[in-house]
Amino acid sequence: MKLNLHRPICFFDLETTGTNISKDRIVEISIHKVFPDGTEKTFTYRINPTVPIPAATTAVHGITDDMVKEEPTFKEMAHKINEIIKDSDLAGFNSNRFDIPLLAEEMLRAGVDFEMGNRNAIDIQNIFHKMEQRTLVAAYKFYCDKDLTDAHSAEADTIATYEVLKGQLDRYPELENDMKSLSEFSTRRKPVDFAGMLAYNDKGEECFNFGKHKGKRIVDVLEQEPGYYSWIQNADFPLYTKKVLTAIKLRGFNQ
């Protein structure tokens, strides 16, 4: 099934040095951009993470320090990557919880402002788990009747993810072929920040989603315990979380 697009959509996958959103770095990114007219383009870049790649991580994706030592850093590639994705919705497999938050951290470290704004984030894994509860390899076999022989290659995983979404739309007529609808369906719980450290309560109010103030309104905590904001800003929290928290704090000053 052809995707019903009102703007381009970028399916993307990251290979990284690990799974810590705040600390780990990208070593490979692949983007498969689909345009409303049906045109498709694929971009794959190896990245020098500037930190060692752990052997356990290399065992998963096969990328070694030697393979990326001559590649550009993410800071050198950030504007080029942003040019590709800035007009697009974003989609991936487990992208809401990992790929988008980690990409946001890399962009902010490189000095490139990163916002989802009015674009949609479609997590194909969440759709899959709600419908069938499997892995990407099983999803590819289930929806596309193909074997994913090159799993954990960013490009192979990216193309497979794109094909799985089309297969899901073919299989489930109740899924609306609309990116906003798919974004809402594939989101487990609406976070305030990418990492889920901040979340909305049932009234749509921003609350802390961790620690001693979990479930409390952010505006109340910042008013009653101003030092908590400073502690977060100086601690090892994701840059995007700090950015969102600052915006909420400044909004309070302006009200």
Image: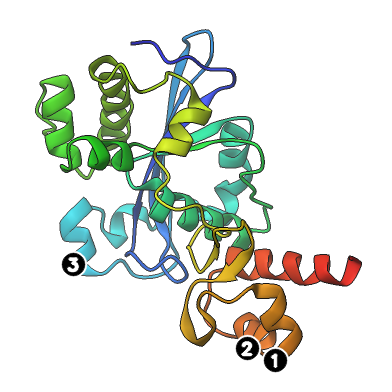
Please name the residue that numbered disc 1 is placed on: 227
Whole-percent x and y of residue 95?
39, 46
Q: CA distance from mark 1 to mark 3?
A: 39 Å
Dot 2: element: helix
Disc 2: CA contacts within 10 A as few (<14), some (14-19) or many (>=20): few
**What is the number of the mark on residue 56?**
3
Task: Say which residue appears at 11% left-offset and 28% top-offset.
Answer: 141
Q: Is residue 201 above or below residue 139?
A: below
Which amino acid lies under the numbered mark 3 shown in the image of this protein? Ala
Q: Earlier in the sequence, mark 1 or mark 3?
A: 3
Please name the residue that numbered disc 2 is placed on: 231
Q: Earlier in the sequence, mark 3 or mark 2?
A: 3
**Side of 199 relative to 47 (left or right):** right
Dot 3: element: helix
Dot 1: element: helix
Q: CA distance from mark 3 to mark 2?
A: 33 Å
Task: Say which residue appears at 15% left-offset and 59% top-offset.
Answer: 59
Residue furthest out toward the right: 254
Is residue 150 in sight in this rendering?
no
Disc 3: CA contacts within 10 A as few (<14), some (14-19) or many (>=20): few
Which amino acid lies under the numbered mark 1 shown in the image of this protein? Gly
Which image quadrant: the N terminus? Answer: top left
Q: Which residue is nearer to you in this view: 47 or 229?
A: 229
